[in-house]
Image: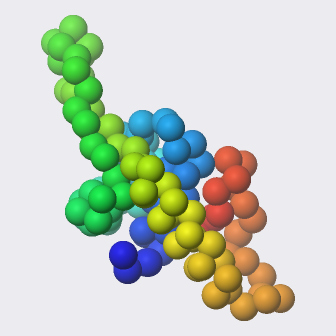
Amino acid sequence: MRMTIPVAKVLAALLADPEAPRYGLDLMRLTDLPSGTLYPVLHRLRAAGWLAADWEEIDPVAAGRPARRYYRLTGDGVRAARLALAELRALAPEGRPSRGAAEPTGAPAW
């Protein structure tokens, strides 16, 4: 998996609570990524086997909105994401100010 800033942002957001299913708009808010950047990242993560995606089972009329597609890291995805982000952090030069403090969730501010 090629580690880009958008990929790192998505992985950090998903790792903040690996058990919590996230939908696209939720991830867009957490990462500040536009849909045109987010969805290709999600597609690549799914193709790599790091991400599972399932449609929620609701009645759109009763809910007053369309069904959401929820994403969550697979077991392999959690391990691979943690390793990838740790390797990325290890590459950051020491003594150099980070691009931001850790988010309240403990996820880095990429």
In depth, the one of 33 and 83 nearer the eye is: 83
In depth, the one of 18 and 108 nearer the eye is: 18
Q: Is residue 37 left or right of residue 109?
A: left
* Image: 34 above or below 89: above
Image quadrant occupied by the C terminus: bottom right
Name the spot of residue 34 as percent of width and height, x first: 35, 59
Residue that lies at the very extreme toward the top in this rendered image: 62
Residue visible at 65% across and 63% down?
A: 108
Q: Is residue 13 left or right of residue 93?
A: left
Name the spot of residue 35 as percent of width and height, x first: 30, 56
Residue visible at 42% across and 57% down?
A: 76
Residue visible at 18% across and 18% down?
A: 60
Instruction: Examine the image and state in which quarter residue 77 appears.
Output: bottom left
* Image: 94 above or below 43: below
Name the spot of residue 5 as percent of width and height, x first: 47, 74
Q: What colour scheme does the image use?
A: rainbow
* Image: 18 above or below 48: above
